[in-house]
Amino acid sequence: MRHQREHAVRRTTVTARTSGEPKDEKRNHFIGIAMNLICRYGVRKTTLEDVAKAAGCAPTSLYYYFRNKEQLVREAVAELFRETLQHVQIAVDAASNPEEQLVAAWRAQTLTAQQSGFAMSLDAATKSELIPIARDILADFEQRYAAIIERILSRGASTKVFRVKDVKSTAKVLSYGVSALLFHMVGEASPDEIAPLLQILGNLMIYGLKAT
């Protein structure tokens, strides 16, 4: 597993999203560096001094953007989830019917995780370090993702594509199921190992929801 993690880190350099503003570009540059260092050394062993050294600047430069390491780590996690939700929504909007939208949402979430050097390089120890720091950010992501799934199920139920009695609860089960599988397996298994499991989970969900 360690070999897979190190291979993913070497293969992918994490780059945080930029908005074009110089200040935001600098901030996101620091976030990208922090993501890479956390993948290599974990949260506890990564310091602001390490980030500054890798960025080629003085540690004081980071305090202009981040109060402390915890804020930097939180923003790194938030960046990944913002990107994921953006890709999911784009994929859902491009799909033509509720069934395709549901599949598109799962695929976009999976693809974003696979393409992220940060997500795919997190081992179990690092994930356990991140959870206490970013628990509320994870909860916010889960709620927003579940809301996307809920809207898809509502459309499917209204058009009789899906057979759903409790849309809100079903949306939570579906969204949490995919997220939990990804969370527990990224960094511990290769994308080729994860993909067929997600396909099985997706098929079970779709066939269980179909009205006919």
Image (spheres, rainbow, N blue to C red):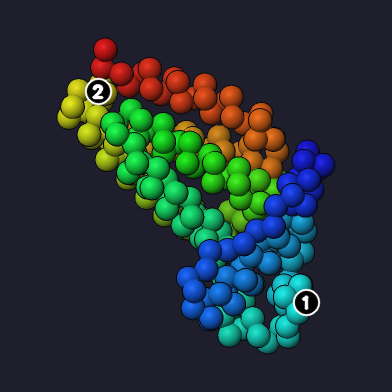
Residue at 70% in and 52% down: 12
Q: How many marks?
A: 2
Identified by mark 2, the residue type is Val
Residue at 58% in and 85% down: 64
Mark 1 to mark 2: distance in Å?
55 Å
- Mark 2 lies on a secondary structure that is loop
- Mark 1 lies on a secondary structure that is helix
- Which label was assigned to residue 53? 1
Residue 118 position within the rendered picture, expressed as x and y whole percent measured from the top left: 64, 53
Q: Relative to the observer, which residue lies in front, 136 or 108?
A: 108
Q: Is residue 107 above or below residue 73?
A: above
Q: Is residue 18 visible?
A: yes
Residue at 65% in and 58% down: 14
Answer with left or right where residue 153 lies relative to residue 128: left
Disc 2 designates what residue? Answer: 161
Residue 104 position within the rendered picture, expressed as x and y whole percent measured from the top left: 41, 36
Residue at 53% in and 39% down: 110
Quadrant housing the N terminus: top right
Answer with left or right where residue 127 lies relative to residue 108: right
